Amino acid sequence: MQYRTRFAPSPTGLLHVGNAYSALLCQAWAKTHNAELLLRIEDIDHTRCRSEFADAIIEDLSWLGLRWQSPVRIQSMHLQDYRQAIHQLRDMGVIYPCFCTRKQIQQEIMRMSSAPHAEAVMASYPGTCRKLPANEQHDRMQHEPFAWRLNIDKAMAHIGEDISWRDGSGCVYAVSVEHDVVIGRKDIDFSYHLAVVVDDALQGISHVIRGQDLKESTGIHRLLQKLLGLPEPVYVHHPLLCDQDGERLAKRNGATTLKGLRQTGVDVMKLRDFLTAAESLCWPFGKGNERELLNILGKAR
Ligand code: GLU
C-alpha cells in the first residue's frame, strides 16, 4: 500500500520554527516510509486567515526544502465538501442547531457546577439547545445565528459499538467524547474537526503526523470518520518544540519566524540540521540572541 501523509498549516500568521520542526518531521516520516507528502492550507476560518500568509507558507516551506505532491489543497476552495458532510450528519439526526452565545454557556455552567476553571468552561457545553422542540428550532433558525453541535449520545447510539483510534506504534486509544462539540461554527459555518476529517479522506491520507497539542482532538476526528463512513488513518503525535522557558513556540508568543530567519541570513541547511537534531526539543535563540543564532546557524561570509 502506498502511504500518504500531509502537512496542514493554517495561514493565520507567518510560519515559525515550531511549524518548521513539525514540517521536517512530516517530511522525514514520509521519506522513511517511502510515502507521498501532501500540503493543505487550512484556511476555513476567514476571520483569522489571510491569503498573503498562505503565499508566505508556500515560500517559506520551499525555502526550508519541503517538497510536496501537487495539487495543494486549499480548504476555502472546497466549502461544498464540508457543507455536504454537515447535510449528511443532519440527515442522520446526530447534530442540532445551537443558538447559545459563549457568555450564556459560561453562565449556565457556572450556575450548574461549582466554578470549574475557565478552559473547562469553554470546552464544555451544558446541553441548553439539545432538547429544543423541532418547531422552535425551525423558527429560530430563520432569524438567529446558530452553530451545529454533535449530539454525542445520539452519535454513539448511531455507531452502536465502542470505537478507538490507533497510533503509529500500534497503541489503541478508546474514544470518549465528553460533550456536544461544535462541528459547524456560527461565524464560519464549519469547524476544524469537520474539515480535517473530510480532507484527510478526500486526500487519501493513510498517516496523520502532527503535534501532540492535537492528540486530544483525535477522538472527535475518529467519531466523525465513523459517522461519515470515512477511512481511518493512523495517527502520530509528535512532541512540540519549546523555548528556553519550556513554553511551546506559538505565533501568539512571537516565536521566531522562518521569514525572519531567512532575512537574518540563516543558512537553511544548518537550520534543517539543527531542527532535525533538536533532541532537547528546545529552540534556544530567543529575542536578543541574534548574534549567537548567527554564530551557530549563519552563512559563512
Ligand atoms: N491546521 C492545524 C494547525 O495549523 C493542523 C491540523 C492537523 O494537522 O490536523 O495547527
Image (cartoon, helix red, strand yellow):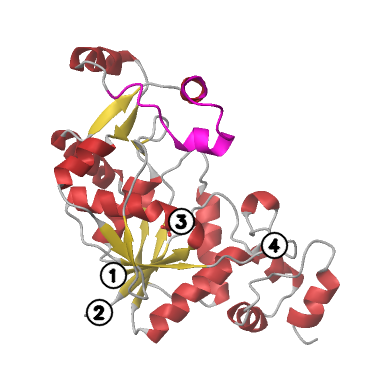
In magenta, the rendered stretch is 110-130
Q: Earlier in the sequence, mark 2 or mark 4?
A: 2
C-alpha distance separating marks 3 and 1: 17 Å
Residue type, label 3: Leu
- The image shows residue 213 at horizontal and vertical percentages of 51, 57
Residue type, label 1: Ser
Q: Nearer the viewer, residue 175 or 93?
A: 175
Element under disc 3: helix
* Left or right of 250, for residue 265: right
* Residue 169 higher or lower than 254, as above or below: below
Query: Does the magenta run of residues contain 199?
Result: no
Residue type, label 2: Gln
Q: Residues within 10 Å of mark 4 (few under 14, many from 20)?
A: few
Q: CB at mark 4 closer than 8 A to ligand 1?
A: no
Element under disc 1: loop
Element under disc 4: loop
Q: Earlier in the sequence, mark 4 or mark 1?
A: 1
Report the residue marked by disc 1: 206
**Which residue is situated farthest in the front direction here?**
114
C-alpha distance separating marks 2 and 1: 8 Å
Residue 67 numbered mark, or none: none
Q: Earlier in the sequence, mark 3 or mark 2?
A: 2
* Left or right of 216, for residue 18: right
> What's the residue at 70%, 53% (across, down)?
254
> What's the residue at 46%, 22% (across, down)?
112
C-alpha distance separating marks 3 and 2: 25 Å
Report the residue marked by disc 3: 214
